[in-house]
């Protein structure tokens, strides 16, 4: 079948459902493409219930959020007094990180702005990064990932058949930002991650991009050259040395204010000519193809569903509007062909090799060594410590 036909098929991912009985949540638009989804008697899914019962408690788009954010920013500034920078900001060129940069200027912060070039930047993302940095007057530091190692790791993941093909990029970006912060004596990282647009996401669709044990295991089996310069961060540094000894913390300012993606785009467009990508995470040419073609075709996952569901439960989108949007194709035929051709050229593979990745075996990340057991033990220890002390441990609480 022509790949254009696949793109049209998965405008609504229902056709790809492997389950015997298809169901969709009566409140949001998450469906049985999540094999672990459950529904209550009213047809409401566990993602909605988790948002109401757990996630919402960490979301403060109100005066309480403003007060909390003021206290956090005061602490960040105090920690950074006498230093060149008081925080680190990883700038991808996406909506969320660019908007945090805009607000950081307003708050009077002095961020060390880091852009990690993984080799997949779209021209629009490069332009957007430049526009925001110039507007804010920030100094930009760019970390360029060794392309041959990045390519080898990217191909290893494609050969592995796991669902989260964005791990190589995500790990490189976050590890670089963490290491850069520590090298410069910075204790705070500003993140664009937020509940308003990312409050719903099925665990069964992905695995932590920071699991370097899993990354190394996949690369050992499917890679062809050693990773000598690729930025890696191990479990001990990630969860023990950096946060507990070096007191490195990540804060997500967008969780402490009213935040809507569309209003952020409009504000940045008016301020500096920032241009939208037309799709979430469109700043990466690989991610655009991975999310809008690879995932729907190989796994039946349409990442618009958790995104729209996040907007629904956070009050930014009506369910009927989301259902209509899901009926639209993920790709136009010409754009899909262009992106596949670009990926094949960039990775130096034939088109039939790419199609082989799509038709090949599907594997779960747990088929490879991972840090799940260590992480469960760590969370138990953390829970015990919080029970003893009566509070969460954070330098910014």
Image: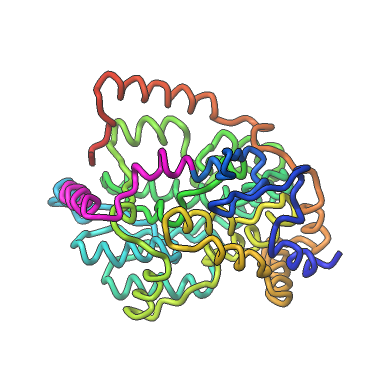
Q: Position of residue 306 (x, y in %)?
A: 55, 53
Q: Quadrant of the N terminus?
A: bottom right
Please tell me which residue is depicted at 72% across the width and 39% down the height of the picture.
363
Q: Which is more toward the observer, 16 or 24?
A: 24
Residue 350 location, x and y as percent? 80, 62
14 to the left or right of 200 = right
Which x, y percent locates residue 358? 77, 53
Q: How is the image coloured?
A: rainbow
Looking at the image, which is closer to me, 44 or 166?
44
Image: 196 above or below 343: above
In this rendering, would 81 be left or right of 164?
left
Q: Which quadrant would the C terminus be assigned to in this image?
A: top left
Instruction: Looking at this view, name the residue that lies furthest to the right.
Output: 1
Residue found 63% across the figure and 64% down from its top: 326
Which residue occupies 53% across, 47% down?
Answer: 201
In depth, the one of 216 and 28 nearer the eye is 28
**What are the residue bounds of the magenta stretch?**
49-75
The verdict on residue 68 being magenta is: yes
For residue 343, above or below residue 380: below
Prevailing secondary structure of the magenta residues = helix
């Amino acid at each position: 079948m022509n790949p254009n036909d696949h793109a049209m098929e998965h405008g609504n991912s229902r056709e790809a459902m492997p389950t015997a009985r298809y169901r969709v949540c009566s409140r949001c638009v998450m469906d049985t493409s999540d094999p672990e989804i459950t529904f209550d008697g009213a047809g409401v899914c566990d993602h909605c219930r988790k948002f109401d019962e757990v996630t919402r408690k960490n979301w403060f788009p109100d005066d309480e959020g403003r007060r909390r954010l003021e206290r956090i920013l005061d602490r960040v500034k105090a920690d950074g007094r006498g230093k060149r920078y008081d925080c680190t900001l990883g700038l991808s060129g996406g909506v969320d990180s660019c908007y945090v940069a805009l607000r950081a200027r307003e708050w009077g912060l002095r961020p060390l702005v880091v852009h990690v070039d993984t080799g997949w930047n779209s021209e629009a993302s490069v332009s957007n990064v430049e526009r925001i940095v110039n507007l804010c007057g920030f100094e930009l530091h760019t970390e360029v990932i060794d392309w041959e190692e990045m390519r080898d790791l990217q191909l290893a993941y494609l050969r592995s058949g796991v669902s989260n093909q964005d791990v190589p990029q995500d790990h490189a970006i976050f590890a670089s930002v963490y290491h850069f912060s520590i090298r410069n004596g910075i204790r705070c990282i500003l993140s664009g991650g937020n509940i308003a647009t990312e409050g719903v996401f099925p665990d069964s669709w992905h695995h932590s991009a920071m699991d370097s044990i899993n990354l190394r295991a996949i690369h050992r089996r499917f890679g062809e050259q050693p990773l000598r310069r690729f930025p890696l961060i191990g479990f001990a540094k990630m969860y023990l040395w950096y946060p507990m000894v070096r007191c490195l913390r990540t804060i997500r300012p967008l969780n402490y204010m009213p935040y809507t993606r569309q209003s952020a785009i409009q504000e940045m467009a008016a301020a500096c000519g920032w241009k939208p990508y037309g799709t979430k995470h469109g700043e990466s040419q690989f991610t655009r193809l991975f999310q809008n073609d690879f995932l729907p075709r190989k796994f039946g996952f349409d990442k618009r569903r958790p995104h729209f569901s996040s907007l629904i439960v956070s009050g930014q989108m009506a369910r009927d509007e989301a259902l209509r949007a899901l009926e639209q194709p993920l790709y136009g035929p010409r754009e899909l062909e262009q992106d596949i051709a670009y990926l094949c050229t960039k990775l130096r593979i034939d088109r039939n090799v790419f199609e082989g990745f799509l038709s090949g075996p599907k594997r779960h990340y747990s088929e490879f060594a991972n840090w799940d057991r260590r992480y469960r033990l760590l969370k138990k220890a953390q829970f015990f410590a919080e029970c003893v002390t009566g509070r969460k441990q954070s330098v910014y609480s």
